[in-house]
Amino acid sequence: MHVEIFQNSRAREIEEEFMAWRRRHPGGKLLNFRPAGTFMIHRSTCGHFEGGTTEKFANERKVCSESEADLRAWADLEGVEIVPCGSCMPGSD
């Protein structure tokens, strides 16, 4: 299982690293933490990550991978629920 996690501490650097990951992995998927305690799964190209603030990018944990199966395995290990993004992954479960 291979995942990369982006969160907190160095806000500007984390945002830049996350955006660079998205550019390097156009076929990848990512989990974005939601205040409700769930993670939303997105395609790496989802428009929800364009034009946000540094604080938003850094404070919401993102777990990224080329493999959706790896993200689901990570979520199972962590005991968290995944919900699909209605914009980039409609109808997914």
Image: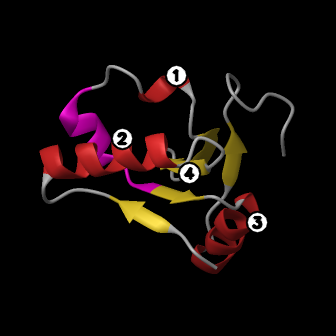
Q: Residues within 10 Å of mark 1 (few under 14, many from 20)?
A: few
In the displayed structure image, the side of residue 36 where residue 43 appears, left or right: right
Instruction: First in sequence, mark 1 or 4: give its number.
Output: 4
Residue highlighted by disc 2: 19
Instruction: First in sequence, mark 4 or 3: give its number.
Output: 4
Colouring method of the image: secondary structure
* Numbered label attached to residue 69: 3
At 63% from the left and 68% from the top, the residue drawn is 75
Instruction: First in sequence, mark 2 or 4: give its number.
Output: 2
At 30% from the left and 57% from the top, the residue drawn is 7
Contact flag, marks 2 and 4 (Cβ < 8 Å): no
Residue 60: within the magenta? Answer: yes
Of 35 and 64, nearer the camera is: 64
- Callout in the foreground (2, 4): 2
Q: Under tag 2, what secondary structure? A: helix
Q: Which residues are magenta?
A: 53-62
- Callout in the foreground (1, 4): 1
At 63% from the left and 58% from the top, the residue drawn is 66
Q: Under tag 1, what secondary structure? A: helix
What is the C-alpha distance between the residues marked 2 and 3? 22 Å
Residue highlighted by disc 4: 31
Query: Which image quarter: residue 16?
Result: top left
Of 33 and 68, nearer the camera is: 68
Instruction: First in sequence, mark 2 or 3: give its number.
Output: 2
